[in-house]
Image (cartoon, rainbow, N blue to C red):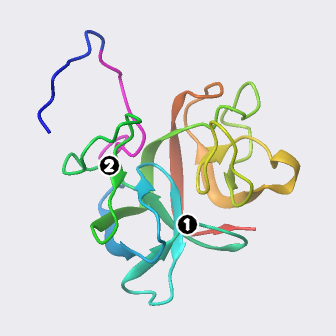
Amino acid sequence: MPQLSYPTDTTNAFAGMLADNERNSDILSRQSEDAVAHPHGVAVVVGTDPERQVLLPTGAANLLGVVVHSHAAEVGSDDLNLVNLNDTINVLHEGRIFVELETGSPSVVAMTTGVFVRVANAGAGEGIGRFRGDVDGGDALTVTGARWITSGAAGDVVVLEIDKGATIA
């Protein structure tokens, strides 16, 4: 489908965009094992075949990384760029990437705020694998080996840095 409209304002960043070139050379290519398309900028964990597949997190696990944006993905009717089923997913395994905070996230996340990822009960403005600044009643778990580089409020796009060996607990 051709693009028929163009925004007059452009954003500085979007979910899944690499934040810098400092340590972003560790990008893995995988296939989704989930039966749903993956948004860019969400957490994924190792799938059944650790060298080929990824899953959205549903509990404690080793964090494989964050889905990297690709302009090859078509924009859906909800304005989300989704990685379609059976398409290759690029995953940032170590480095800095922009992620969008859930709209229900606490008012502000900062460099001193913990990093949490949703693993259950996604409502409006939320999603499995999306990042936030609290546990949301146990529906989100702590990510160790990750930190906020910039601060922001619910719905903002902020920079997240992840290390190899990061875990969701």
Seen in the picture, residue 107 relative to 66 is either above or below; the reply is above
Q: Quadrant of the C terminus?
A: bottom right
Q: Secondary structure at mark 2?
A: loop
Which of the 4 quarters of the picture holds residue 27? bottom left
Residue at x 25%, y 9% (from the top left corner): 8
Bounds of the magenta segment: 10-22
Task: Identify the amino acid type marked 2.
Answer: His
Which residue in the structure is indicated by mark 2?
Answer: 69
Which residue appears at 72% of the width and 34% of the height? 104
Could you give the CA–CA distance between mark 2 and mark 1, rounded to whole angstroms? 16 Å
Q: Is residue 20 magenta?
A: yes
Name, please, the residue furthest toward the bottom: 49
Mark 1 secondary-structure assignment: loop
- The image quadrant where one finds the N terminus is top left
Left or right of 50, for residue 165: right
How many neighbours does mark 2 have within 10 angstroms: few (below 14), some (14-19), or many (20 or more)?
Answer: many
Name the main secondary structure of what is drawn in magenta.
Answer: loop
Which x, y percent locates residue 32?
Answer: 41, 73
Decide: is 8 above or below 147.
above
Q: With respect to residue 101, does 127 lie above or below?
A: below
Residue under pointer 1 = 56
Does residue 136 appear left or right of residue 132 in this picture?
Answer: right
